[in-house]
Image: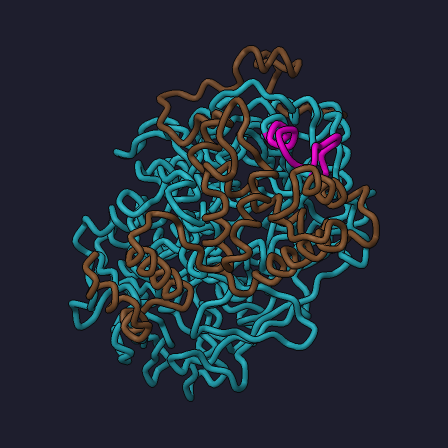
Amino acid sequence: MERRDVVKLLTAASLAAIGLGAPEIARAAAQAQAALQGAPVYVPVFFSKAEWPMVRSLAELVIPRDARSGGATEAGVSEFMDFILNENPGSQKWMRDGLTWLNAECRTRFTRDWVQCSPSQQHAVLNDIAFPRKTKAAAKPGAEFFTRFRDLTSSGFWTSRIGIKDLGYMGNVTVPAWNGCPEPQLTKLGVSYKMSLHAVRRG
Amino acid sequence: MQTQPKRLEYDVVIVGSGAGGGMAAHVLTQAGANVLLLEAGGWWDNTKDSQMMKMPYDSPRRGAATKERPFGEFDACIGGWQIPGEPYTKAPGTRFDWWRGRMLGGRTNHWGRISLRFGPDDFRRKSIDGLGDDWPVTYDEVAPYYDKVDRLVGIFGSVEKLPNHPDGIFQSAPRPRCHELLVKQAADKLGVWCIPARLSIITKATNSRAPCHYCAQCNRGCMTNSNFTSGNVLLIPAAKTGRLTIVTNAMAREVTVDAKGSATGVSYIDKATGQDRHVKGRIVVLAASACESARIMLNSKSSRFPHGIGNSSGVVGQYLTDTTGTDVAGYIPKLADPINHNCDGVGGGHIYMPWWLNNKSLGFPRGYHIEVWGGLGQPSYGFMGGIEHYPDFSGYGAGLKNDYRRFWGATVGFSGRGEMIPNADSYCEIDPAQKDQWGIPVLRFHWKWSDHETNQARHMQETFRRLIAEMGGEVFSPMPGKDKGYGLATGGSIIHELGTVRMGGSAATSALNAHQQAWDCKNLFVADGGPFVSQADKNPTWTILALAWRAADFIVQQRKAGAI
């Protein structure tokens, strides 16, 4: 992109003039910024510079790389979260408050921020908030945050190319004939197409 | 596609391009009428515009809802509960959500294609249990039209000969999915009728339309026109007659009348320019959806019709009903660790449970049918939220990643859809002050559920939980109590509004006669869900289609006879 085009792009007025809303303007500005810097890395629009590495590490802890597939980082989950939160201004506070809580918890326990904690320290905190049924009263805000964060990680991971391939979702294609439930699954479930599909009528 | 009326006067002006408007346009143009149809939204052709084949990673929001598409960005229906510039109001204490579709074909672009005929009892409920009113038509009079609709549109199902669930002219139904066979097994044990679904999705080539290819994305609109939408099955073919003009982005304001009280046409706003326009028609058919048609009539005031055209009975806007609804989902351990396969099928359940009980000892009138969902569905925004409820889940990390894999498709859900009795507290009227962005007075809603409906919801909840238990499953949430209406969904949220321009046997107590013709104005007809005298344990769309065809035939016959 030519420098002068980038500068033009950075003018919020011109962006508003072509009908972009606030979230789109923020996104466009961030991308223009990145283009200026010549860097291909993703520049978050919603997450602050301090929050971004927290989110990346947390998402990877929720769904890590394993033998079958890459983890949240490789699947772009944090980028997905950044997009979603930027697009939904009415639904941002929980994330911000939750990351704040996480840092406060780490400072209380380990006198350092989340990103500076060791893996075992991070796990210690997660173990206290990842299981809602076992959460102690003091950790409840953390558990509520983490439950929501985990759900958002799942949303972002399993809908990514990596996630879809990992699950093995083979649908949303054209099939010439619908064959129903495959034999091995029928056997496993103890059902069969020999069953009548009529209504069972009692007297 | 036209953007402006071409003629000075049309034989028929139709407002609304959904099931009723589409069918009326189809039948009337076939019969030789020159028809102009006004649609509030924009053009839509599923064979070109559908996002059927999109994968979630094709969008940064992975299928999440947008303002324009509250059911998901790939869902076909443009519209919503809140439309900028088009408010509605509610009386204090009213909980009601009003959906508007704003596109060619309306709600038919994303509906569930559940296509159930009303049964003989459904047209004469007052005679049976003393509640509500009887229709001025019988099943036998509507049956030939259900047959025509089955043949024209195409529907799959199975012949079952169940009382009050008339069989149609069915194409073959796709086999149940794995989890549906488990459901069938459990239903059989509990004595709940469970049979192949009846969906307007074609499984063989029909009227030059290709059969379903089982991608399960029906709600996104079908690129091969294998499911029913008003736009692709009725309107686009009707336009080929050369006698149909469709004007999109046209917001109807009112039906105009002459001094004698005959309808003369429709005033509307051209949304692109904001200009007031008028189109003349010898006959006007309103099919803007039940509440919008009522609104148009109530706003069509004149010295001849001080309470709105066709409203000398005062019933327009009254007797508003919606389908009752509640859902329960359960984790079924047998379905964990699935053997992976393409589980898509059609975009809907391959089985369903029609109403099976006698009300004598139930504590509520009428009934409901049960819809089933589950399977290894396409991941989308919100995928497997709530993993923390599953037994022995791992919290986070490699174990959690494996939990998602193991539990994918292990949840089965049931949704009940039942019959509400019309009540005096549920109706819509014109708000005395509020207007929309074009200065058209808006609707104010009043709504109350009665014990009839909450007791029905309780029965749904209990039944679903028994089914899940019979499948060896576990429900993660406790049954909602009476204070929560036993989980009864908010009025309007099932999006089956009916009754606001009811037909009947007398001009004193109804707005329309048995042919959906206004008693007060014989060249005004209503062809959407407004004319319905009652709900049923069945969805309304197939009946909207059959009745619209019947009304259109009547119009043709009356025109030929010189009566209108």
Image hue for chain B = cyan
Identity of the residue drawn at 43% across and 83% down: B301
- Residue A51: name its quadrant: bottom right
Residue B247 locus on image (x, y percent) = 26, 64
| Residue range (magenta) | B388-404
Specify whether B139 is left or right of B564. right
Q: Is residue B151 magenta?
A: no
Specify whether A13 is left or right of B442. left
Residue B194 locus on image (x, y percent) = 63, 29
Specify whether B217 is left or right of A120. left
The colour scheme is by chain
Q: Is residue B393 magenta?
A: yes
Is residue B249 visible in this depiction of the protein?
yes
Quarter in which the C terminus of chain B is drawn: bottom left
Residue B219 locus on image (x, y percent) = 44, 43
Identity of the residue drawn at 53% across and 18% down: A181
Relative height, residue B306 to residue A91 (above, below): below
Choose between A98 and B187: the one closer to the eye.
A98
Quarter in which the N terminus of chain B is drawn: bottom left
Identity of the residue drawn at 41% across and 53% down: B77
Chain for colour brown: A
- Residue B207: name its quadrant: top left
Choose between B537 and A96: the one closer to the eye.
A96
Residue found at the far bottom of this picture: B303
Specify whether B133 is left or right of B507. right
